[in-house]
Amino acid sequence: MHLSITYTKKDFYNAQLLHFRTKKRVLLWVLRILGGVFLFVFLTPILAGVFIGDLISVGQFLPQALASFAISVWLLIFPYIWLRYLSAYMFKRANLKDVEFDFSEESIDAKQPSTTSSKTWDGVFDYVFNDKVLLLYCSQISFMIIPRRICDNKDWEELLSLVRRKIKKST
């Protein structure tokens, strides 16, 4: 199967988001839990003051509550802001031009105007995909990005079938 890809920033963002959600899941949940804790700390004095009817106590805790709220918002949205920045940075740094992939039963060949590489299926140890992108992992943090937008449904299913045959997931 032959695929020609012109990468976009959106491809890199979708790849980083999928990688983060599948491989860095624990970190994402830790940040969400910490954000929830700080949000709880923010809401507790305000709700207690409102329910008790003691608005003076709300005023006493307002600076701490606002600081807690700011920290919780930062913890809850930080991963997504970081991924936007990281994907934009990686897109600029990669300086990828048009890439042509040839998927065969033996290997994956990638060609750019200035370089060519070949990777046997034994060198790809894992894969993840969603409705936007397929990631083929060559190491824990290094992966090839295959955007869904470059394939029609038939080619996408054929590619996924080949990947599933060649890469046995360890679950």
Image: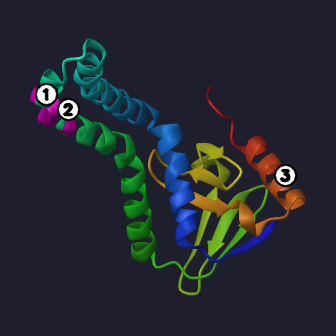
Residue depicted at x 42% and y 51%: 80
Residue underneath mark 3 = 157
Residue projecting furthest to the right: 154
Q: Quadrant of the C terminus?
A: top right
Residue 146, percent across and down? Answer: 65, 61
Please state which amino acid type lies under the numbered disc 2. Answer: Ala
Image mark for residue 61: 1
Residue underneath mark 2 = 65
93 in relation to 155, above or below: below
Q: Quadrant of residue 103?
A: bottom right
Mark before the other along the chain sequence, 3 or 2: 2
Residue depicted at x 43% and y 60%: 84
- Tell me whether the residue at label 3 lies in contact with that at label 2, contact meaning CB atoms closer than 8 angstroms: no
Q: Compute the Cα span from label 2 to label 1.
A: 6 Å
Residue 46, percent across and down? Answer: 25, 25
Please state which amino acid type lies under the numbered disc 1. Answer: Phe
Residue 66, percent across and down? Answer: 20, 38
